[in-house]
Amino acid sequence: MSNLPLDVNKTYLVTGAAGFIGFYLSKKLLDQGCRVIGLDNMNEYYDVQLKHDRLDQLTPYDSFKFIKGDLADKTLIENLFKENVPDIVINLAAQAGVRYSIENPDAYMQSNVIGFYNILEACRHYPVDHLVYASSSSVYGANKKVPFEESDFVDHPVSLYASTKKSNELMAHTYSHLYDIPATGLRFFTVYGPMGRPDMAYFGFTDKYFAEEPIKIFNNGDFENDLYRDFTYIDDIVIGIERLLSTKPTGDVQHAVYNIGNNNPEKLMDFIFTLEKALSTALEENIEFEKVYEPIKPGDVPATYASTDLLQEAVGFKPQTSIEEGLTKFAKWYVEYYQKKNSVKA
């Protein structure tokens, strides 16, 4: 591994730049003076206005260039590489969501498999210093051995989303082997925070509360054997990515995979109670969700728990933002954002 400072003279391509992680990473790079090309198809999987609001914070930077386009459009991707010659590529664009992959598998094959193939082909024909790409903790499937380590067996995914992410890791390894493309995969563990994805549970719970609707909790109401999740705050994710950008894999095959998680799984119910408390503080009133308990959904896993030893060894960093701190920041943002949005509507 070679761990070097971020090179501000490089051009960084961030796919999914209007997405949750893509936005925060792009902003961090721009704040440090880097040139960033942002690609996003601005699809309607969730509220497009939120994507536009993120993008509005990036467009004022002179060193930011935005291209609206789809990863699955091979000609567009090839022309993008030919015209902009990116040095480092961070592929965060993907069709996200475990449950949605059961309803709409085509979107996952187009974006996550064909789209990623197009990125790999572009990196092959227009060589880059480093390709960093999003994988997911979902590749661990229903593994019972915890914490999850990068060396664990991951050949039993339980959702199509997880299968596409596992295929990304295999494809990247192959291209690294055949064409000497330095590539690093990142297995993210339940990322949350302000300006996050509305399809994520914590965001959806908050939406439901303000819509005066009950929240659905898929744990059968079993508090003793509750679902566990390794919730990772967005700032920790971005620091991890930023440090890995200049940490290229070495060896015969220049491919590596890292967990980026909090290494501290929380019971889902504890997370919900902490969210209620954070919203109570933000609104200065007592908040309690109306709860409906249902069976676990197909594709969901009982627990996620990241070992972060490899990440710490490579870049000297371990995510550590507590859910109290992270959810307090989310609740404050949510209340301010939607109050402002509703006042504009009125």
Image: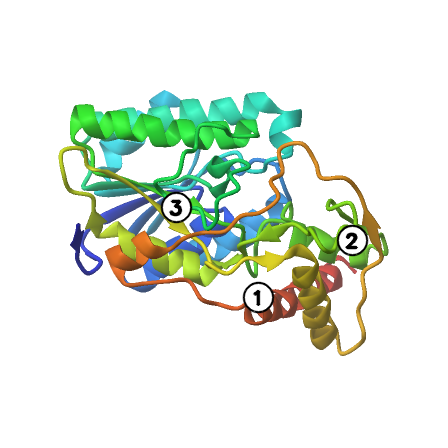
Residue 77 visible? The answer is no
Q: Residues within 10 Å of mark 1 (few under 14, many from 20)?
A: many
Label 2 secondary element: helix
What is the tally of numbered marks visible in this picture? 3
- In the visual, does 162 lie left or right of 4? right
Question: Which residue in the protein does label 1 denote?
Answer: 323
Question: Quadrant location of residue 333?
Answer: bottom right
Question: Quadrant location of residue 343?
Answer: bottom right
Question: Which residue in the protein does label 3 denote?
Answer: 149
Task: Name the quadrant of the C terminus.
Answer: bottom right
Asked if marks 3 and 2 touch (Cβ < 8 Å), the reply is no
Tell me the amino acid under the disc marked 1: Ile
Question: In the depicted view, which residue is nearer to us: 131 or 135?
Answer: 135
Residue 294 drawn at (x, y percent): 80, 42
Question: Quadrant location of residue 59?
Answer: bottom left
Going from the N terminus, do you reach mark 3 or mark 1 first? 3
Mark pair 2, 1: CA separation = 20 Å
Question: Which residue in the protein does label 2 denote?
Answer: 208
Q: Nearer the viewer, mark 3 or mark 1?
A: 3
Mark pair 3, 2: CA separation = 35 Å
Residue 87 drawn at (x, y percent): 21, 43
Q: Nearer the viewer, mark 3 or mark 2?
A: 3
Tell me the amino acid under the disc marked 2: Lys
Classify 285 as above or below 203.
below
Q: Residue at x 71, y 65 (%)?
A: 273
Residue 47 visible? The answer is yes
- In the visual, does 206 lie left or right of 324? right
Tell me the amino acid under the disc marked 3: Glu
Mark pair 3, 1: CA separation = 22 Å
